[in-house]
Image (tube, helix red, strand yellow):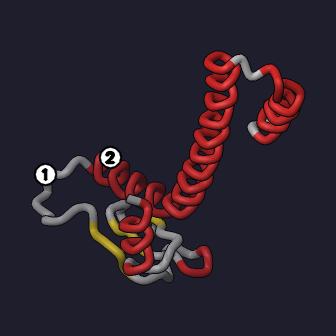
Amino acid sequence: MTSALRAALAGGTPRPWAVVESPWGDGSWITNGRGGDPHAGEFVADCDWPEDGDEDPGCTLANATLICEAVNAAEGLLVSIEQLTADRDKLRALLREVRNIAEHHIGYGGSANCSRDTLRLTEIAKEAGL
């Protein structure tokens, strides 16, 4: 999922995107707003097409704003997803190790390695941030 979204972001109009509002627009256009000026950017989309007059202007502005906010936040969200995935994978590996130590002690009366295992469990707790 993250690689497909990264590819879509790379292929799309450069960010940040911004809604063009009054006095230059009606809140239905999206530009890439280079240099912080949304009115000077490249055209991205018109959220009020076809212009049949039936659109709710408040809804059009809300849709344009939602699209811009989602696109502008996507890169940061991808970084967070990737970091959380890496953290989850690390914690899973640590939990497997804890389970193996516990099974050794329960199943085999592993008292011979008790101090070594206690030390490793303490290290695991630190690695897990506990």
Q: Residues within 10 Å of mark 1 (few under 14, many from 20)?
A: few
Circle number at residue 58 = 2
- Judging depth in this view, the residue of 94 and 16 nearest the camera is 94
Picture coordinates of residue 59 (x, y %)?
A: 29, 46
Q: Do the numbered discs 1 and 2 sit on residues whose CB atoms are within 8 Å?
A: no
- Left or right position of 78 against 65: right
Q: Residue at x 50, y 74 (%)?
A: 15
- Residue 38 image point, x, y percent: 51, 73
Q: Is residue 24 above or below residue 57?
A: below
What amino acid type should be assigned to the residue bearing mark 2? Gly
Confirm whether residue 21 shows in the render: no
SS for callout 1: loop
Q: Amino acid at mark 1?
A: Asp
Residue 54, labelled with which disc?
Answer: 1
Relative vertical location of residue 53 with respect to residue 125 in this rendering, above or below: below
**Label 2 crowding class (10 Å Cα cut-off): few <14, some 14-19, many 20+?**
few
Question: Which residue is at 61% across, 43% downward?
Answer: 93
Count of marks overlaid on the render: 2
Where disc 2 sits, the SS reads: helix
Residue 75 x %, y %: 53, 63
Could you tell me how far apart the alpha carbons at marks 1 and 2 are, in whole angstroms?
Answer: 12 Å
Q: Please name whichever residue, 30 or 75, is drawn nearer the observer in this view of the structure.
A: 75
Residue 87 visible in the snapshot: yes
Q: Residue at x 58, y 43 (%)?
A: 88
Q: Quadrant of the N terminus?
A: bottom left
> Residue 61's x, y, as percent?
36, 53
Q: Locate the C terminus by quadrant.
A: top right
Check residue 44 in the rendering and tell me which mark sits there, or answer none. none
* Relative to 125, residue 72 above or below: below
The image quarter in which residue 2 lies:
bottom left
